[in-house]
Amino acid sequence: MTPLLANFPLEAVLGISIPFAAGIIVALTAIITGHLRKMQRDDMEATLKMEMIQRGMSADEIERVLAARIGSQARASRVDARVYASGPVPSAPRREA
């Protein structure tokens, strides 16, 4: 150990470094999965555009389809935000048998 850490017991050093390392791992995992999800979404959107072009759809029709798709995603995220903001859903009272 370095002279700075030599004065501290091993349990204290591990008690600080393990949660710190776990936090870094969680943060990196969140960043990586976020990027992978964005890449997958972009790939799916590009595939959809190519399929619509191959079907002979006009640019206006493609734009309309993509706008409707993005609008539905925005509505879904607003609904999710309202559900999470309202707190836990109350459960139904239990009936005794």
Image (cartoon, rainbow, N blue to C red):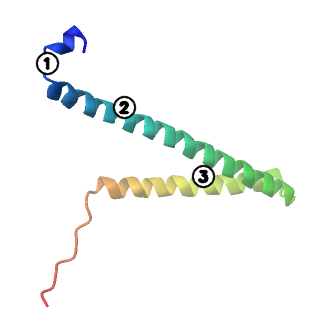
Q: Which mark is residue 70?
A: 3
Q: Which mark is residue 45?
A: none
Look at the numbered disc 3 and give the secondary structure of its residue. Answer: helix
Q: Which mark is residue 24?
A: 2
Q: Is residue 35 above or below residue 40?
A: above
Quarter of image, res 68: bottom right
Q: Which residue is mark 1?
A: 8
Assess disc 1: are there few (<14), some (14-19) or many (≥20) residues with their C-alpha within 10 Å of its C-alpha: few
What residue is shown at x 26% (from left), y 65% (from top)? 89
Give the Cα distance between marks 2 and 3: 33 Å
Give the Cα distance between marks 3 and 1: 55 Å
What residue is shown at x 44% (from left), y 53% (from top)? 78
Please state which of the two labelled residues, at mark 2 or mark 1, is closer to the viewer: 1
Q: Are marks 2 and 1 in contact (CB under 8 Å)?
A: no
The N terminus lies in which quarter of the figure?
top left
In the image, 73 versus 15, the foreground residue is 15
Q: Are marks 2 and 3 in contact (CB under 8 Å)?
A: no
Indicate the amino acid at tag 1: Phe
